Each structure stands twice: as structure tokens, then as C-alpha cells.
Image (cartoon, grey):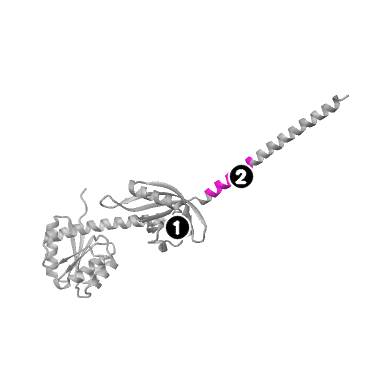
Amino acid sequence: MSASPTQILLVEDEAPFAEILREILLHEGQGRFTVSIAGRLTETLEQLKRPGNDLVLLDLSLPDQQGLATFAAVKRAAPALPVIVLTGLNDEEVALQAVREGAQDYLVKGEFDGRLLTRAIRYALERNQIERKLRQSEEFFRLISENVSDLIAVVDTQGRRIYNSPSYLHVLGAPEQLRGSDSFASIHPEDRDNIRQVFQRVLAQRGGQRAEYRFLLPNGAVRHVESQSNVILDEAGEPAKIIIVSRDVTERIQADQQLRRAWTDLQKSHDDLQTTQQQLIQSEKLEAVSTFAAGAAP
């Protein structure tokens, strides 16, 4: 089944130029494009309310709006649509600013042909799709990180904090205030050297490592954590970041310690009971011997 044609909204107030662009797009697209035309911003905004538009070719100089304000109005009306700006030689700097503010590309009128135009459209659609998937991934990660109790952190190769999930609020404080700080500084001094060694092994081996250690909180309290770390590689295959997923196991550690103390106390009570029983048996034996001896005496 063939894909639906790409619906292009061409915003251009010079009717002859708009018709030329439409013919170029229909010819070069070979059935892949459909084109609708708007000559004013008000007409553009009305067309953007209708479903089906896939891309906007936007002249910034319209009878009812000029410059970056034109682009800003279109992006407010359709923030997800890719926009290619059409500009004159005198407005190239404005077009560049539009790209900085979210336009996919710009083309200077009179300096492109049909092939360049269709290539710019194809690239703009592809980049927009990649950006949309990236935003979805970021939103997915944000929802996960905000709704789990595990501690999720991303640090650079020096151990400086890049990201901490909201769950860190109840352990080390506000995540935004942790950004850029030394992640090793919050580790208990007795565990710090060992965790630095684990961190270096993760970088060297480019693989995951598990570790148990303690956080020393600003108020002096101690929290026990279990962590699993993994390397994020850059395009060259070199370590760029470390993601660390930790779980606060303080309650479990404290419960284990209490259980061990209870077991120790129980063992001691058992030993004391055995000792008492032995002493009682020995005492009873001595008493029996004494009774026997008294009875046997002449």
C-alpha cells in the first residue's frame, strides 16, 4: 500500500510565484505532494486548524504580518509541523533567526530549483520525525523517572551530576540543585574510595557494575543504597555518560541488623539456658551424691 501524499501548505502572497512553486512541487514530487496556498497570515491560521497538513513553506513577509512574528504565529498555531522559511536576500538574517527558534530550514527566493526544494522538504520531514521521536522518548523517560521510587542519576565521566530523578528529593535534596555537583561527595567517606574504583572499572570495561554503599546526608543521617551502573557511549564508541539506578535499602538493612541482633540475643539466651541447665543438673547430681553418702554412712 502506497503512502499518502505529503500535504504542503504554501504561504506566499505573490500569486504568480506561488503558482510557480506549486507547479514545481507537483512536477518534482511525481505524485508525492499535494499543495494548498495561503496568501495572508489570517488565511494561514485558518488552514492550520484543519487536519492533514504535513509541512509549511512560509514566506515571512505577508500583507498582514512581517518577519519573525509571522513564524512565531505559525509555530503557535501548529507547533508540531515542520516549517521551511522562504526569504529574500535582504531577510536572510531573519530567516537564520527563525531556524534558531525552530524552523527546519530556509531557502532564499531565486536561489533554489525544484530539486533543491524537494530535497529540503524531504530533509525537513525526516528531521521533524526524528525530533518528534526524541521528544516522545524524553517524555517517556520523564514520566518513568517522576513516577518511580528508584533513584535515577546520570553523571559525566568525571562523576559530575547531569541529571537526578525527582526521587532524590527525599535523599539528597532538590534535584535541580544537585546538577553539576560531585556525585562522590555525598558518599560516606568509608565507602568513597571503593566506589571511585567501581566507577573507573565501569569506564574501563564499558559495562555495568553493581555496588552497595552509603549516602551521607547533609543532616548527618546515613542511607544504604544498592546501585546498578551502565555506560552511555558517544558516536565514536567512547564513554560519554554513566547512568546509575539505585535503590534505597536502608529499611531492609536495618531490618536485617535487627534480625541479626534478635538472633544473637536468642542464641545468647539459649546458651545461658543451657549453662543454667548444666549447672542445675550438676547441682542435682551433687545433691544426690550427698544424699547417697549420708544414707550409706554407719
Badge 1 is on which residue? Answer: 186
Callout 2 amino acid: Ala
- Expressed as whole percent of the image width and height from the top left, the position of residue 259 reads 58, 45
Q: Residue furthest right?
A: 298
Q: Is residue 188 left or right of residue 199?
A: right
Badge 2 is on which residue? Answer: 262
Q: Do the residues labelled 1 and 2 touch (CB within 8 Å)?
A: no
What kind of element bears circle 2?
helix
On residue 67, the disc is none
Q: Residue at x 37, y 52 (%)?
A: 243
Q: In this view, does 74 lie to the left or right of 209?
A: left
Q: Which residue lies furthest to the front in this view?
A: 298
- Name the one closer to the observer, 206 or 51: 206
Name the main secondary structure of what is drawn in magenta. Answer: helix
What kind of element bears circle 1?
helix
Callout 1 amino acid: Ser
Q: What stretch is highlighted in magenta?
A: 253-267
From the image, state whether disc 1 or disc 2 is nearer to you: 1
